[in-house]
Amino acid sequence: MDFKVTLSVSACLTEMLGDELLQQRYVRYLNDRISLAEQEMRVFACNARLASLARREHDRFVHCLTVFIEKWGMDLRRAFGYLQSSGNVAVIPSAATHAYGPLWETWPQVVDLQVRVAVEHYQKTFGTAPSGYWLPECGFFPGIDILLAQADVQYFFLDSHGICNACPKPKYGVYAPIHCPRGVAAFGRDWGSHEQVWLKDRGYPGEPAYLNYNRDIGFERDIEYLYPFTHHSGRIPTGIRYFRIGSESQTMLYDSELAAVRCDEHATHFVSQCKVRVRSLLHALGKKPVLVALFDTEHFGHWWREGPRWLDQMIRKMSYDQEDVKLVTAVDYLHSNPMNQIASPSMSSWGYQGYSETWLMGRNHWIYPAIFETIELLEKLIDKRLLTDKQRRMAVEQYLREMMLAQSSDWSFMIHAQNAGRYPEDRVREHLDNMLTLYDQLSQGRIQEEWVESLKIKHNIFSGLDLVDIYLRCSKAI
């Protein structure tokens, strides 16, 4: 099939995909779910409909296990590499640990570290330089485009208001990219495409025929029944679900054939709406418009079980069933349309209210001044004359790892959403404590090598890169 889409993969994700321990844990997870589904099939031996649904879940886990082990050798980086080499999918990196850029603007060398580690890790993983870059949460601030240009990034994506509020005001709005003054192209999200899929109460995932994410047996069976398969004393999702959206009784069991029909209808509807909009915009703008549909990958398959099927159907219909709209990557578009308006985007994100409120509010604002202090301490440790000492360099490199891990926007998001208990706060404080301990040891010249080694084993992200050297280059470039 000839189609073009862009997929963003963060450096920390590709790093974890190659971790043998995590690969083995995923295999155990799938085997546990297979065993749980088999138990469900035995429980429902006298109920043909539920037994069939349990069988369906069982077969899904078996298929995942087979693909993971036999097709990709337990290393999904190979899968991303295959997609990249196919020419149909443009795989691009995001910030090394998905740090939300605008809140680190006062420390450009730290933002640059996130960019350069992501780019160099991408090159190490895929053997080629990335063409584009995904700003975590579409978080843009004036100046990050300069860092991206220095890293030879050709384009990035923004939410619509980042483009619409650019200076000067873009002539074509979000329906054509703009070039930042340093030459990097910025594509703005098309909200019309997004709302068609995810608009609350009217988006496709709310279809009553689709599988109900909230009716997971992990929240309905006795914990003692689940424990041999989940190994968890609390309630967690198992991925096994039998009911349709909105169902509260046994009379609304999931019907996979009906869901497939609705999926096909929704794919057809999305394609038809794109055609209508493209024709209208072509007439209004006097040039071919670009519609940038940006979606969280986790929504497809996780929150919306039928999402991957919808994507497959939509791509096939877009590629084969019409000629008005063509799927392209950002690079494809720039090759065909190299001349675009020069403008400077405004600070923006795609979070709540469109700026930084999700990651900087009453519950999580304490994170930033605490990490700012550790960055100030780091500046005291970066002395090239002293970094020739192997032990000291190892400790400083671990300091950088802890700092980058603490910067992850996931922690502040989870604290904001209050959906993970104390875990995200504990993780941030753990990284802060580790940095302070490392600083004390480095400043006193009493490095506890065994402790640093144990910490490196525990938090060993980006071990294949020289983080100290990268940070020194970032500091020199600013």
Image (cartoon, rainbow, N blue to C red):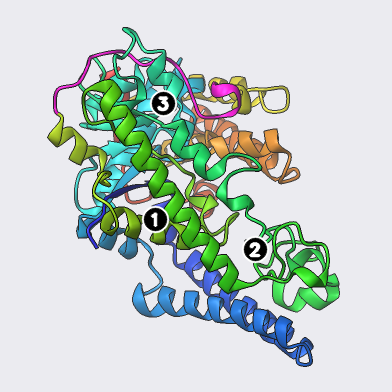
- Which comes before the other along the chain, label 2 or label 1? 2
Q: CA distance from mark 2 to mark 1?
A: 19 Å
Residue drawn at 58 percent across, 56 percent down: 304
> Which element is circle 3 on?
helix
Of the pair 67 and 109, the residue shown nearer to us = 67
For the residue marked with disc 1, what is the amino acid? Met
Q: In the rendering, which numbered label is found on residue 157?
A: none
Q: Residues within 10 Å of mark 1 (few under 14, many from 20)?
A: many
Asked which quadrant contains residue 383, the reply is top left
Determine which residue is flagged by label 1.
314
Determine which residue is flagged by label 2.
211
Please provide percent x and percent y for residue 25.
55, 69
Pair 3/2: label in front: 2
Please identify the residue farthest to the top as the structure is shown: 168
For the residue marked with disc 3, what is the amino acid? Val
- Left or right of residue 165: residue 90: left
Q: CA distance from mark 1 to mark 3?
A: 40 Å
Please provide percent x and percent y for residue 145.
31, 22
Q: Are marks 2 and 1 in contact (CB under 8 Å)?
A: no
- Left or right of residue 390: residue 47: right
Pair 1/3: label in front: 1
- Which comes before the other along the chain, label 3 or label 2? 3
Q: Quadrant of the C terminus?
A: top left
Q: Does the magenta-highlighted stretch encompass residue 5?
A: no
Pair 2/1: label in front: 1
- Which comes before the other along the chain, label 1 or label 3? 3
Residue drawn at 77 percent across, 74 percent down: 227
Of the pair 437 and 83, the residue shown nearer to us = 83
